[in-house]
């Protein structure tokens, strides 16, 4: 636990968090790091925001090799005969 002083910072208030404390929550490079801050009971809770995109998070644990092994074979679809200029010779 650290004893910090709240200071005026423009129209807001702020604290300076020691780098050692940031490292303890997984923030090694704090510049422009996004965090989540919440109030629980009488405490401020600061958490490192996941740095992976939502798309990357959705594919976390996806095994591409396993997918190809289970879905081998032709996956082509028949879209019918050409109807315009899309036919190439």
Image (cartoon, helix red, strand yellow):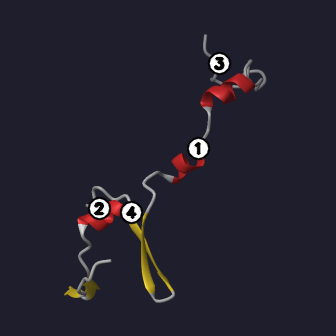
The front one of 55 and 60 is 60
Q: Which mark is residue 25?
A: 4
First in sequence: mark 4 or mark 1? Answer: 4
Percent across and percent down for residue 87 are 65, 18
Residue annotated with mark 1: 59
Secondary element under disc 3, as helix, strand or loop, is: loop
Disc 3/disc 4 C-alpha distance (Å)? 57 Å
Occupied quadrant, residue 7: bottom left
Percent across and percent down for residue 25 are 38, 63
Nearest to viewer (mark 3 / mark 4): 4
In the figure, is residue 73 to the left or right of 45? right
Disc 2/disc 4 C-alpha distance (Å)? 15 Å
Residue appearing at x 77%, y 23% in the figure: 78
In the figure, is residue 23 to the left or right of 10? right
Secondary element under disc 1, as helix, strand or loop, is: loop
Nearest to viewer (mark 3 / mark 1): 1
Disc 4/disc 1 C-alpha distance (Å)? 24 Å
Secondary element under disc 2, as helix, strand or loop, is: loop
Occupied quadrant, residue 61: top right
In the figure, is residue 59 to the left or right of 3? right
Residue appearing at x 67%, y 28% in the figure: 66
Q: Are marks 4 and 1 in contact (CB under 8 Å)?
A: no
Q: Which mark is residue 87?
A: 3
Occupied quadrant, residue 50: bottom left
Disc 3/disc 1 C-alpha distance (Å)? 36 Å
First in sequence: mark 3 or mark 2? Answer: 2
First in sequence: mark 3 or mark 1? Answer: 1
The front one of 83 and 76 is 76
Q: Is residue 81 above or below residue 57?
A: above
Residue annotated with mark 2: 32
């Amino acid at each position: 636990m650290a004893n910090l002083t709240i200071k005026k910072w423009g129209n807001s208030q702020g604290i300076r968090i020691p780098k050692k404390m940031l490292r303890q929550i997984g923030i090694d490079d704090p510049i422009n790091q996004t965090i989540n801050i919440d109030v629980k009971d009488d405490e401020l809770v600061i958490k490192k925001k996941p740095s992976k995109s939502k798309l990357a998070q959705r594919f976390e644990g996806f095994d591409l090799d396993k997918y190809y092994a289970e879905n081998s074979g032709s996956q082509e679809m028949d879209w019918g005969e050409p109807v315009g200029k899309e036919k190439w010779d």
